[in-house]
Amino acid sequence: MEAGTPDLIKLEDLEVGSGLTGRKHVLSLLVENKPGVLARIAGLFARRGFNIDTLTVGPTDDPEISRITLTLDGAVHPIDQVTKQLHKLVNVIKIRDMEPDQTVSREMALFRVQATVESRGEIVQFADIFRAKIVDVSRRSLTIEVTGSNEKIDAFERMIRPHGLIEMARTGEVAITRSRPDS
C-alpha cells in the first residue's frame, strides 16, 4: 500500500474493544518533583494516542513529591496498558485510577463576563445561585470564580454565556479519595 492511498475502512474495525470501560478515568499520580517528569508522562500518553482532557500538577505535603491529576476518556483506549507503562517510569511513585463514587473532585474556573448596568443584577444572582464569588469588578465587566464539579461549571457557563462571555479559564480537576466511614 502506498502512502496517501485512500483505503476504505470497515465499520467493524472502528468498534470499541472489550477492554474498554467506557467511563471517564481520573488518574492520580504521585511523582518525584524533578524537571522533565511531566513531559515524560504526557509524552507517554501522546505516543499511545490518548487525549488528556484535563491535567493539573501541584505540590503535596512532601516538597519532594508532586501530585499529577489527569482525566481521560476510557471509551477511546484501554487504560490498563498505559498505567503499566507509567509504573516503569523511574520518577513515578504511585498511580491510582480513582473510582468516581469513592472520589471527591473539584475544578475551579474564572469567567469574565460583560456586565452592563441592566444585566449586572442578574449576573450577580447567577453567582449567588452557584455559590460563586465575584473577584473583580469594572465598569463593563465582572470576573467570577466558580468552584465545583465540571458539570456545575458547565452549567454556570451556559447561564452567563448569553450575557457576553469575554474570557474563561479552567483549572482542570483535582481529586482525592473519600475518607472511609470508620476513619
Image: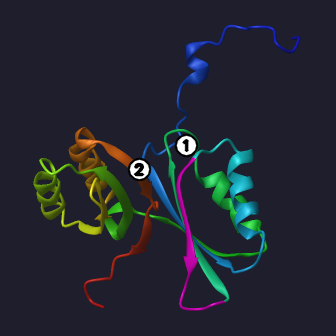
- Up/down of 9 relative to 180, above or below: above
Q: Is residue 56 magenta?
A: yes
Query: Which numbered disc, 2 or 1, marks the residue that appears first in the sequence?
Result: 1
Residue 31 sits above or below residue 46 on the image: below
Q: Residue at x 56, y 18 (%)?
A: 12
Q: Residues within 10 Å of mark 2 (few under 14, many from 20)?
A: few
Residue 129 horizontal side relative to residue 8, left or right: left
Residue at the spot x=37%, y=67% of the render? Answer: 105
Q: Position of residue 73 (x, y in %)?
A: 49, 46
Residue 115's mark? none
Residue type marked 1: Gly
In the image shown, does 120 or 153 lie closer to the viewer? 120
What amino acid is found at the position of numbered circle 2 in the picture?
A: Glu
Image coords of residue 66 (percent x, y):
61, 79
Quadrant the N terminus occupies: top right
In which quarter of the view is residue 64 placed? bottom right
Q: Is residue 104 magenta?
A: no
Element class at badge 2: strand
Magenta stretch, main secondary structure class: strand
Q: Secondary structure at mark 1?
A: loop
- Tag 2 residue: 167
Left or right: residue 113 versus residue 18 is left
Image: magenta residue range:
52-63
Which residue, given by chain and number where applicable, does mark 1 sit on? 19
Question: How many residues crowd mark 1 within 10 Å: few (<14), some (14–19), many (20+)?
Answer: few
